[in-house]
Image (tube, rainbow, N blue to C red):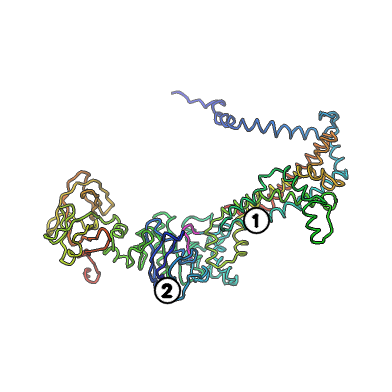
Amino acid sequence: MKKVELIDVSKSYDKQVDVISNIDVTIEPGEFFVLVGPSGCGKSTMLRMIAGLEEITGGIIEIGGKRANHLSPDKRDLSMVFQNYALYPHLTVQQNITFGLDVKKVKKAVQAERANEVAEMLGLSDFLKRKPRELSGGQRQRVALARAIVSEAPICLMDEPLSNLDAKLRAHMRTEIRRIQRKLGITMIYVTHDQVEAMTMGDRIMILHEGKIQQVGKPIDIYNYPANPFVATFIGSPPMNISPARAVPTKSGIFIEDTIHVPMNEEQVAASSARSLLAGIRPEHIKPIVTGTESGNRIQVEVTNVEILGNETVFSFQVGQREWMAKWSGQWDIAIGDQVPILLGSEYFCVFDEETGELIRKPEGLEHLSIAKEVII
Amino acid sequence: MTTVRAPGVWKRSANLRVGFLYLLPSIILFAVFLFYPMIRTIYLSFFLTDQNGNAAVNVGFENYSYLLTSPAFLNSMKATGLFVLYTVPVGIILALFFALLANEKLKGIGFFRTMYSSTMGISVAASSVIWLFLFHPSVGVFNRILLVLDLPQIQWLLDPEWALISIAISTIWMNTGFSFLILLGGLQNIDEHLYESSRIDGAGYFYRLRRITIPMLSPTLFFIITISLINAFQTFGQIDILTKGGPSQSTNLIVYSIYREAFINYQFGTASAQAVILFVIILVVTLLQFKLLERKVHYQ
């Protein structure tokens, strides 16, 4: 179980524009680390740089405490699962799994034994004699996984391994990959564009955008306290509602579209004065006004779209130029065009500096439920 | 109640007729330039002909039995066999070697790719004339080089021992461009991720070549082997220009022998019989190849 450390790593293809820059991160031994970002943000390139398939143009990569900038891929003690699985179509499943062992001249008997062991772990025992083209997408995915596991490398890299699977299988494989990683205790570096995968699988996640780190941290911290508007809208579904806001020092707070007031303390006001601001609130923090609702920003909105997802209802409405969304639990009988009174809990608002993207005001009063406190036996 | 009558033959064959209509242009072309000559050749092979190639006397299989005992024909069969052995394996290995070189991602590799495939763009006649100069006993480059190296001179195209080899060398040169291009195309089709995955496993160049490149290239290799074999059996142009079948029949390959039999000796009957024999040989070789080699080919 090895540590991977990236120190001020950058990459450029034409020696002028950096596609990746200022990457500083330490991936702890045994950690499940997820790199997430939209297409073209450089996450796959970063993974390939760790694997040694791409040159690094600046900075240092350390693997297991040793400098690895110029180590060839096989000297880095890692395994990799590719997005298209990269299975050898002319070899059987067994030969595919043992390919790496054969390269390292492991004895045939040992190869077969290890292949059987891994195949059993992944439920591939019945398919060992088949060719990849005779397998379903999910089975191929497992073969790719088996190939990575059988090498017993302490670090495993995965490049969007689940993106070619259907939604149901993807959900299943998410838990399976997580279970295997915990069982073997390997350091996992996992690339995905799917924020759900990132949230559910990662011990820590790193959000990349245009080759730069946006935020690194535990999924729940990133969800609660996004470092900038990009992270706020990238993580969470539906995304956080964000609108421009204006500071009004006399009222000790800011106004969104002159109607929604968000109170701020003196320090926050000082940090935000004379700057253009963005204020955001998560859809689940927009609440219905029912009996016993405390006071806050009550406004009347016109519904522009409704989606009922079984036990929750998502509807949209206009706030100035932006379309906002609210998520209420339960099935609500709302039609397009209805006037709905809503409550915007002012404590839940995030406030960002529009220019730097910096988070000026953290949301407060987030519900943290714990079994020990809430459940009465 | 009205009964629904089954549609008539005319109606049911509508799709067939439309399909046939689409095929008609190529059927006409094939019929005029392929099927008719082929049937005519088989027909003529059972006859003695007059000078204009009209069937005169039906001799049954006599043309064939004559050929199979004729030392001249057996000699040209042997020469053809040797020629195929000289050109096909060397040509393909050479083309594969160049293709592997040109498949590397280097600066300016496009130039080399163009150079290696350039022989495709030169006609057999033009390149044969070039080779005629290269092989020239006194002013040719090859003999000059031998002279400089203090080696005995070779009468390339005039020595019966060397003539077939000389023709083979020029043929390999002419065919390499095409084989190279096809093989390079095959190499570029191999998924780059397979190589990356094997690099992570630590596979060296020759391990990758043996366990990934060659198996993945096998459909292309199979195709190019088939085409090269057929081409080698049908070699004509360079022989006509370089040696005219000589010296002492050593380069009288089968197609050239057919040409001489038909258009110099006006023996259209025996020429047709030779053509039919060549057809059968190529057919058998190709079928054998499919039977023996195709099992080793990995189609995706």
Q: Which mark is residue A3?
A: 2
Q: Secondary structure at mark 1?
A: helix
Q: In the structure shown, which secondary structural element does the residue marked by tag 2 occupy?
A: loop
Instruction: Specify whether A330 is left or right of B238.
Output: left
Rendering coords of residue A16 (x, y %) = 43, 60
Amino acid found under the numbered disc labelled 2: Lys
| Residue B13 vs residue A193, the one in the foreground | A193
Between tags 1 and 2, which lies in front? 1
For residue A309, the mark is none
Corner quadrant of residue B98: bottom right
Number of other residues with Cα within 10 Å of mark 2, as a class: few under 14, some 14 to 19, many 20 or more: some
**Circle 1 chain:** B
- Residue A311 inside the magenta-drawn segment: no
Q: Nearer the viewer, residue A243 or B68?
A: A243
- Up the image or down, B273 lies above or below A6; here it is above
Q: Residue A72 location in percent, x, y?
A: 52, 69
Marks 1 and 2 on same chain: no
- Majority secondary structure in the magenta region: loop
Regarding residue A57, the answer to whether it shows in the image is yes
Looking at the rendering, in which quadrant would you find the N terminus of chain B?
top left
- Marks 1 and 2 sit apart, C-alpha to C-alpha, by 43 Å
Residue drawn at x 74%, y 33% as measured from the top left: B39
Which residue bears the numbered disc 1? B98
Residue A91 is drawn in which quadrant? bottom right
Query: Relative to residue A191, is residue B14 drawn left or right?
Result: right
Point out the stretch of residues depicted in magenta: A80-85
In the rendering, at what x and y percent does residue B112 appear?
A: 62, 54
